[in-house]
Amino acid sequence: MSRDLNRIHQGDLKKQKTTVDSLIGILQKTNAPSENPELQQLFIYENNRLKEMGDYFSNEVSQQVWSRINSYMDNFGKENDYHIILGTQGNGNIMYAKKEIDITEEFIEYANKKYEGE
């Protein structure tokens, strides 16, 4: 899935990289690039856009992959009647847990009482 999503976004990134590379080529051929502030501004804008696109696609792909994995993990745990599944990524170290063994609310109440001096 990660490869498929990356492949989808690579076209857009490649187009933007070509734009940036073209601007670099034009700036390098210009005798005095500092005398063309519009071209420099355009390069800065397009280069920043390339970086933002890369960051967005990277985050988007990661989020989509982990969302799907977490969904699969939830189904897998239920189908196999597991009580808990531990992992190293995803939504923390616990990839799946039956609702009956989730003591989060109980702990929050305990911690709040301790904090308040009870």
Image (tube, rainbow, N blue to C red):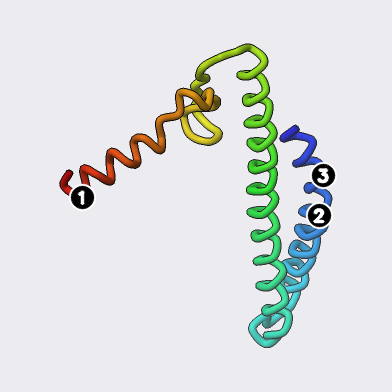
Between 2 and 50, the one nearer to me in the picture: 2
Q: Is residue 89 left or right of residue 80?
A: left
Disc 3 crowd, CA 10 A, few/some/many (<14, 14-19, 20+): few
Looking at the image, residue 70 lies above or below residue 80: below
What residue is disc 1 on?
116
Q: Which residue is mark 3?
A: 8
Q: Earlier in the sequence, mark 1 or mark 3?
A: 3
Residue 101 position within the rendered picture, expressed as x and y whole percent measured from the top left: 45, 23
Element at badge 3?
A: helix
Tell me the crowding category of disc 2: few under 14, some 14 to 19, or many 20 or more residues within 10 angstroms, Cα based: some
SS at circle 2: helix
75 relative to 1, above or below = above
Q: Quadrant of the N terminus?
A: top right
Nearer the observer, disc 2 or disc 1?
1
Where's residue 56, x and y in %? 67, 54
* Amino acid type assigned to the residue bearing label 1 in the image: Glu
Spatial CA span between label 2 and label 1: 54 Å
Disc 3 marks a residue whose amino acid type is Ile
Amino acid under label 2?
Answer: Asp
Measured from the top left, where is residue 51 in percent x and y?
65, 59
For image coordinates 69% across by 41% down, the residue present is 64
Compute the Cα span from label 1 to label 3.
Answer: 53 Å
For disc 2, the marked residue is 12
The residue at 64%/43% (across/down) is 63
